[in-house]
Image: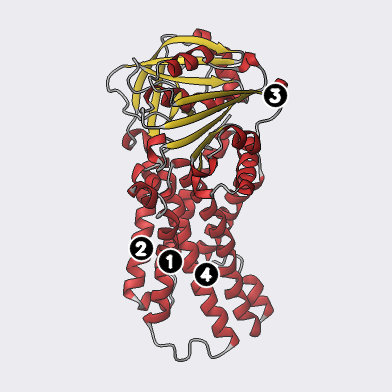
Amino acid sequence: MLYKYYSRLGWPLVVILTIIPVVMWIFGVPFEGRFDSPELKLAAIGSITGLVAVMLFCLNIILSTRLRELETLFGGLNKMYIAHHLTGGIALCILLLHPLTLALEKASISWKDSALYLLPSTSDLPRTLGTFALWIFVFLMILTFYVKMPYHLWLLSHKFLGLVLLLMSLHIILMPSINQNIIVLRIYLLSFLFFASVAYIYRTLLPRFFVRRYEYTISQISNPATGVSRIRMQPKNETLDFKSGQFLFVSFQAEGMSHEWHPFTISSNSKDDGLEITVKDLGKYTSTLVRLAPSLAGMDVLIEGAYGRFNFRNFQSRKQVWVAGGIGVTPFLSMLKEVPEDYKVDFYYSVKNEEELIDWQEILMNIKQKTNNNVRVIPIITDRDGFLTAEKMSNITTDIKECDILLCGPPPMMKALKQQMLQLGVKKNNMHSEEFSMS
């Protein structure tokens, strides 16, 4: 299956695109004299770390676009966002080395000059621009990795990455260095700074003009389980095209609701009338949504998507194990309605108590409609049966090592099950999960 290999190209491309400017720098001019002293070696390290940091920063912004072509390269939007997160963190670490090594280069002449090199200077505009870019980026990354803040404030802080991008671009354009003598390298860097700028304008600055969004109206509200609301929507104009198991971003335009965008898995099937999401009270935003849900009928919503590759057809084996924990059942509700007869599926559905089962009767009805009994559902009520474990699953699904395993549920549950399955001998590449959520 081509998708299996195509979906692994993301990280290799990140590495290759990041290394290319370093190779250009190394072979762009003769080696003679470039590493003859400790100072020159520090200057070389400073140049290399600067090149790598710029590339990772540009790729970090490009990966935030949610473009489906990029999503496919990483095997899903959740994995692409993990790459976005990691490239930002790595870029920060390497970017810190860039001025430090250049400052140490000057220490052999004067420790004072070395210390002042890390501060803005009115007499050196290019370096000052780079210094401001560095410290703003450091501040934003500290907020991202170490400060827990509401999603809308986190989103607002990321808008300032555009300022970092502008200052970094001016720093590279104005800073006299060996890079300016390597024309191909200069073009390469400026090209990616341009692509990153376009990506920033597209996703962060002017998304309402460039990102395709769909207008829907809430037509029906129901409560399939305790603390759970099901929201059915009808299109006002264009209809969203999606596959079962995918998710979308929704902005509710109702009074009392924040207009920020949140991801929800689609629980309806593409053959159903309208579009449906199922929401559980898990945090501040979803708590407000569930509380206000009865009054939302007739309200407008904006939708962006669909995203994700969490669909049983995207995986090679026709023997599959599906594992749902709590509200993680939503993608499987959509997929159950279209499982072909040549697939064999064991569906484990774990909840704390029977009151938390969502659409249990509908699940049983869908399975009864299968003419060859190729789908088997195994409910796990933890208050009665204890926690679901890989060992319990292997006792029921005896050929589990031959299956593709799809997991969706609370992160601690999925992490524990993956570790247990690895110990049983299940291959890591046979385990697939969707882990994109904001509560």
Give me the C-alpha separation between circle 2 and circle 4: 17 Å
> Which residue bears the numbered disc 2?
190
**Mark 1: few/some/many CA within 10 Å (<14, 14-19, 20+):** many
User: Taking 321 as reference, is 164 above or below it?
Assistant: below
Q: Residues within 10 Å of mark 4 (few under 14, many from 20)?
A: many
Inspect the image, locate mark 4, and give the three-letter code of the amino acid beneath it.
Answer: Thr
Mark yes or no: residue 159 visible.
no
Report helix, strand or loop for mark 3.
helix
- Residue at 69%, 30% in the rendered image: 387
Q: Which one is earlier in the sequence, the residue at label 2 or at label 4?
A: 4
Q: Callout 2 environment at 10 Å: few (<14), some (14 to 19), or many (20+)?
A: some
Q: CA distance from mark 2 to mark 1?
A: 8 Å
- Residue depicted at x 41% and y 20%: 268
Q: Quadrant of residue 27?
A: bottom left
| Residue 345 vs residue 223, the one in the foreground | 345
Residue type at tag 2: Leu
Expressed as whole percent of the image width and height from the top left, the position of residue 77 reads 44, 41
Tell me the number on the disc at residue 385: 3
